[in-house]
Amino acid sequence: MNLVTIALKSIRQRGLASSLTALSVALGVMLMVTVLVIHGIVTDVFSQRSIGYDLIVGPKGSDLQLVLSTVFRVAPAIETLPYQYYLDLQNDRRVELAIPFAFGDFTEQGGFPIVGTVDEFFLNEYAPKQEFQIRGKRLSRPFDAIIGSQVARENRWDIGSEFKLVHGGAESDHVHDEKFTVVAVLAPTGTANDRTVFIQLEGFYQIAGHEQNLIQSIKRQREFYGQSLDEKEIAKEAEELTKKFHLDEPHDHGHGDGHAHHPHSHGTPVVQKRVSAVLLRMKSGPTSIALSTELKRGLQAQAVNPIIPMARLMNTFVGNIQKVLVVLTALIILVSGVGIFVSIYNSMSDRRREIAVMRALGAGRQTVFSIILLESILLCVGGGLLGVLLGHGLVFVAAPFVEAQTDLVINPLRFERLELILLPALIGLASLVGFVPGMTAYRTDVARALVE
């Protein structure tokens, strides 16, 4: 009979106490595993792994606000940039891909944010090695829309559904007359795309009230580029654009009647178009740094590496909460270890005669010490393995409910590298708490224990 078999038999003899102490360890490890998995998911959301672009270009201001509005769509846009600047970035030899975003409106039902963009956005990765899965067709007409999975679920929309927009949020009473039609639905991504409605950028500019005053638009663009603000030059440019795009003719936007009454549009001059942000994928890392540094010297725009403000937000808020939870669960495991110590130590007085008999039959002090230590390790490791199973089981059961409430895509089989530390840590804890009872068994007086 080997030492492990003897230790297991001893544990079974104290079945109830052993089960309770192992269960306490299992519950502590279960909480630890759950915290680690949730932390890993949140870290993915608050890191560059949740966006497949190197830089976000936007107006000067808070880099965090730019990221929150562009990536998470939970903050208002800082300001806008000239559409011409987006075209300049698109033609920059350092830029591999440039995607414009235009914000400002929300759905009348549900208050989901509207993003005006181009179809190329859906043809590229939304996060590293993550591509959009789309049911439906691409944006082809100005009043087409692609909706996220959460929008589809909460509003009960599908391909063919029609909706209107409001300016400034669901509480606003400024409802646009234009109707948009859903042409595609995105599969869940676990990002803000799930609760976003995407419309064609040209359709965004055709919404009544989105057009900019021509004179003011020319002035703003000239100011951005540091050009002359001569009134005569501006007036002449405005006159030429008015004639070219027939801006003096009344345009019917089809208010209230959907796609059927959107007539031919003469188009919108570039100078009247604005974008809220531009997502950039650069050709190399050094070019990202060079462009960011270049824009820092200017006064009108900024280029933000999204990982920097995201990491700052993570460390400031989410990171501290995670640390507190890890400390609390570690204390729970430590208390469980103390429970194992108390259980084994208290049993020593009842087992003195048993230990003395073992010694009398030839078992050495080292053997007795090893058996007690093995009991502690088996209880800790057994409880720990049960806790790992329970922790992942809890994540597996909770995943559908969490996804339904937050639209975070959770892999129930997700494994965090920090979990690998749990087993060695439990063995170390078991060795620590089993040492004193083991030494008590080691020092047992065989003669006195046999006559008692």
Image (cartoon, grey):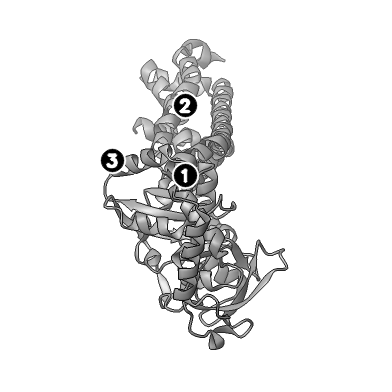
Q: Secondary structure at mark 1?
A: helix
Quick one: label 3 or label 2, which is nearer the N terminus? 3
From the image, state whether disc 3 or disc 2 is nearer to you: 3
Name the amino acid type tagged 2.
Answer: Leu
Amino acid type of the residue tagged 3 in the rendering: Pro
Q: Mark 3: give few (<14), some (14-19) or many (20+) Cα within 10 Å.
A: few
- Is mark 3 in CB contact (under 8 Å) with mark 1? no
User: Disc 1 versus disc 2: distance between alpha carbons?
Assistant: 29 Å
Q: Position of residue 231 (x, y in %)?
A: 53, 56
Residue at numbered disc 1: 43
* Pointers 1 and 2 in contact (C-beta within 8 Å): no
Label 2 SS: helix
Q: Residues within 10 Å of mark 1 (few under 14, many from 20)?
A: some
Q: Is residue 170 above or below residue 16?
A: below
- The circle on residue 429 is 2
Considering depth in this image, is 220 or 134 the residue closer to the camera? 220
For marks 1 and 2, give the one nearer the viewer.
Answer: 1
Q: Rate crowding at label 2 as few (under 14), some (14 to 19) or many (20 or more) other CA atoms within 10 Å.
A: many
Compare marks 1 and 2 and give the one earlier in the sequence.
1
Q: Amino acid at mark 1?
A: Thr
Kindly indicate whether the residue at mark 2 contacts the one at mark 3 (C-beta within 8 angstroms): no
- Kindly report the distance in space between the C-alpha atoms of the residues bearing marks 3 and 1: 26 Å
Number of disc labels = 3
- Disc 3 target residue: 286
Mark 3 vs mark 2, CA separation in Å:
48 Å
- Which quadrant, please, contains the C terminus? top right
